[in-house]
Amino acid sequence: MKQLVEGAAAPDFSGNNQHGDRISLAVFKGKKLILYFYPKDNTPGCTAESCNLNENYEYWISKGFEVVGVSPDSEASHLKFAEKFGFKFNLIADTEKVILQAYGVWGEKMNYGKSYMGVIRTTFVISEDGIIEKIFNKVDTKEHTSQIIKELSI
């Protein structure tokens, strides 16, 4: 599994959002990006994290950031999830796990003593020129915005 580090170039990515539009890292050149990876639409932790970022979306925009979520769910699943909670940002469907693997967030997990492959919840803060500024491996799903603000001192 690839291990990305702060200060490294963010891997390029391209995928379809909940509306079927192609989204890539290049679209965000000149903007800071909060790129968060989550396991599954409409699950408690993923919903809390996405809603927290969405509730603070105007704050992020005012600070020059864009927000993008990525999971292995389909475009249709993302559309239902986004419409249900009114998300203002893109959710990328990575059903083939290409972006997940490029960012090193598809890996072995444990649940009730059983090992399985899944998304390792992680957030990357990427600079205007595509450099990884901060990696959050331990995401506070309910207070993710506050967590990012505190770490970045913004």
Image (cartoon, grey):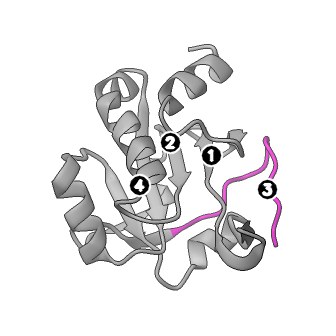
- Name the residue type under label 2: Leu
Task: Point out the frontmost of discs 4 and 1.
Answer: 1
- The residue mark sitting in front, 4 or 2, is 2
Mark 1 touching mark 2, by CB under 8 A? yes
Of all residues, the one furthest to the bottom in this rendering is: 96
Q: CA distance from mark 2 to mark 3?
A: 16 Å
Query: Mark 1 — residue?
Result: 124
Instruction: Name the secondary structure under disc 2.
Output: strand
Marks 4 and 1 close (CB-CB < 8 Å):
no
Magenta stretch: includes residue 10: yes
Image quarter hosting the C terminus? top right
Amino acid carrying mark 1 in the image = Phe
Residue placed at 71% from the left, 68% from the top? 112
| Sequence-first tag of 1 and 2 | 2
Residue 102, image x, y percentages:
68, 70
Say which residue label 2 marks: 33
Part of the protein shown in magenta: 1-13
Earlier residue among tags 1 and 3: 3
Q: Residues within 10 Å of mark 2 (few under 14, many from 20)?
A: many
Q: Which residue is mark 4?
A: 27
Which residue is denoted by mark 3 in the rendering?
A: 4
Is residue 40 shown to the viewer in this render? yes
Quarter-of-image position of residue 53: top left
**Secondary structure beneath label 3:** loop
Above/below status of 101 relative to 30: below
Q: Nearer the viewer, residue 69 or 112?
A: 112
* Residue found 34% across the figure and 60% down from its top: 42
Asked if the residues shown at circle 1 and circle 3 are in contact, with their CB atoms under 8 angstroms apart, the answer is yes
Amino acid found under the numbered disc labelled 4 = Val
Q: Which of labels 3 and 4 is toward the front?
A: 3
